[in-house]
Image (spheres, grey):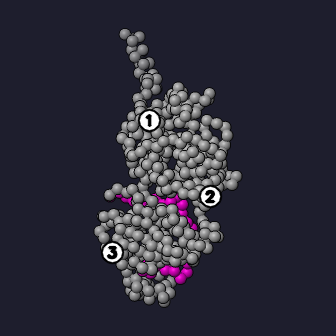
């Protein structure tokens, strides 16, 4: 009996120290973490997968993967190459490296770009058309020593809205070096581009859906230099932008015509560039505040569901503040919002969001109080404008103004009157349809 008791105690200690088999999580149960090296039938598919390194001159920026969707067209994550002057492309089945310094299409919101790769021809990978059902089997391929193909399997959990983008959530483990890799389904078609991120304090893997890649392929244009994607405009482009007469913001509620100030050229050039990219198309006017105005340009509003908390995602960069003396927040002015000073000591502006001031009229006493609170001094012209036309004087000196409405303030006034929720989002969606440039 004593011997039996001793054996039982040792057995319990062994189990408590992990000697027994650990219970797998649901994700681990659906993930084949041990690669299958006998998938030679996937070799032809893997021929169209490549490792990439992006460079700014000779300085390496990012590394990842991509795959061919045309004979010499490779799709990858835009964020891997957006500040690059060239990209080195090395197919996973050979040692030769090719160069890509041009692109034919990109989508900043869905984080996609299609590069033109010189000197190569590959059979493109076919894309899944339409949406996939939950629990669809998913696969990621990787080479192994000896030229065999490793096949890592998982499954699709669902399609989710993550930071304003519709993504497939998958159980495959996507490592940093695999960002941009194709994620396949059992018919060997790519269901999207893989990557991982921390969402709600949990590390998760995703695939950018193939439907967005197919849409981007339909929009491809003549090749442009990668360098043109870098922030800022060259002298020639800036000179052309300075001559633009105005821009028309077409919305569900009507058209608003604006002009951009040449006194803030970096904001002017940035807004024009985003409009040419169709970045603003389908974005919500997501914030409407009585006695202030309307706000739009947030990337997380394109696919936003009703009741969702939105307005926090920009284009992936910010712009230095540019406060111009003489420009103030009278009715009709256009400015750039930013996150609070506690998290933004340099007061950098959001890269894409903008607001249009409808405002209200102020009394001298109110303006006096604002001067004392904000440590500023209103000019006689400012006081006259705020008392007769109205505006938002509390923003002066703290936010960059870069444009003005020239016609369509009646549309702004109509939008300001709509019903909103507690976060100032209109109860019925109002979208920007597109922004036209007036030459």
Report helix, strand or loop for mark 1.
loop
Please check the rendered image and state whether residue 331 is part of the magenta-colored stretch, yes or no: yes
User: Can you tell which quarter of the image residue 356 is in?
Assistant: bottom left
83 vs 335, nearest the viewer: 83
Answer few, some or many: residues within 10 Å of disc 2's Cα (few below 14, many 20 plus, some between 14 and 19).
some
Instruction: Provide the residue designation for mark 3.
Output: 414
User: Can you tell which quarter of the image residue 300 is in?
Assistant: bottom left
Q: Is residue 178 visible?
A: no
User: Can you tell which quarter of the image residue 317 is in?
Assistant: bottom right
* Residue 187 badge: 1
Rendered position, 237 above or below 4:
below
> Cα distance, mark 3 to mark 2?
42 Å
Asked if the residues shown at circle 1 and circle 3 are in contact, with their CB atoms under 8 angstroms apart, the answer is no
Residue 197 % position (x, y): 48, 47
> Cα distance, mark 2 to mark 1?
35 Å
Tell me which residue sits at (56%, 69%) in the image: 269
Answer few, some or many: residues within 10 Å of disc 1's Cα (few below 14, many 20 plus, some between 14 and 19).
few
Q: What span is colored magenta in the figure?
A: 307-334
Between discs 3 and 2, the one toward the N terminus: 2
């Amino acid at each position: 009996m004593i011997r039996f008791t001793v054996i039982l105690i040792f057995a319990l200690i062994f189990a408590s120290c992990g000697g027994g088999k650990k219970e797998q999580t649901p994700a681990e149960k659906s993930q084949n973490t041990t690669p299958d090296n006998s998938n030679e039938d996937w070799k032809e598919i893997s021929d169209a997968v490549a490792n990439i390194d992006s460079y700014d001159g000779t300085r390496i920026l990012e590394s990842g993967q991509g795959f061919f969707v045309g004979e010499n067209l490779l799709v990858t994550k835009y964020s891997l190459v957006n500040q690059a002057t060239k990209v080195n492309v090395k197919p996973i089945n050979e040692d030769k490296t090719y160069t890509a310094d041009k692109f034919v299409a990109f989508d900043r919101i869905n984080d996609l770009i299609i590069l033109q790769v010189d000197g190569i021809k590959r059979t493109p990978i076919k894309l899944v058309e339409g949406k996939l059902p939950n629990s669809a089997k998913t696969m990621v391929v990787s080479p192994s020593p000896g030229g065999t193909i490793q096949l890592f399997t998982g499954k699709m959990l669902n399609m989710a809205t993550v930071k304003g983008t519709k993504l497939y959530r998958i159980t495959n483990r996507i490592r940093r070096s695999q960002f941009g890799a194709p994620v396949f389904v059992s018919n060997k078609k790519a269901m999207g581009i893989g990557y991982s991120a921390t969402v709600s304090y949990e590390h998760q893997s995703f695939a950018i859906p193939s439907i967005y890649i197919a849409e981007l392929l339909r929009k491809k244009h003549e090749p442009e230099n990668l360098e043109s994607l870098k922030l800022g405009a060259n002298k020639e482009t800036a000179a052309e932008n300075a001559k633009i007469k105005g821009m028309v913001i077409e919305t569900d509620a009507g058209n608003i015509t604006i002009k951009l100030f040449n006194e803030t050229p970096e904001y002017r050039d940035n807004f024009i560039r985003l409009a040419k990219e169709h970045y603003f198309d389908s974005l919500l006017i997501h914030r409407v505040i009585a006695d202030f105005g309307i706000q739009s340009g947030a990337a997380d509003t394109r696919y936003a569901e009703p009741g969702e908390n939105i307005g926090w995602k920009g284009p992936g960069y910010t712009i230095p503040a540019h406060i111009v003396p003489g420009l103030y927040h009278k009715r009709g002015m256009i400015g750039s919002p930013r996150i609070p000073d506690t998290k933004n000591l340099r007061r950098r502006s959001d890269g894409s969001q903008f607001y249009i001031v409808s405002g209200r009229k102020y009394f001298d006493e109110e303006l006096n109080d604002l001067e004392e609170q904000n440590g500023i001094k209103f000019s006689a012209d400012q006081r006259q404008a705020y008392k007769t036309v109205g505006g938002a004087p509390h923003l002066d000196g703290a936010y960059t103004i870069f444009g003005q409405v020239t016609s369509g303030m009646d549309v702004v006034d109509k939008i300001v009157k709509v019903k909103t929720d507690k976060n100032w989002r209109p109860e019925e969606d109002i979208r920007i349809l597109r922004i036209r440039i007036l030459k």
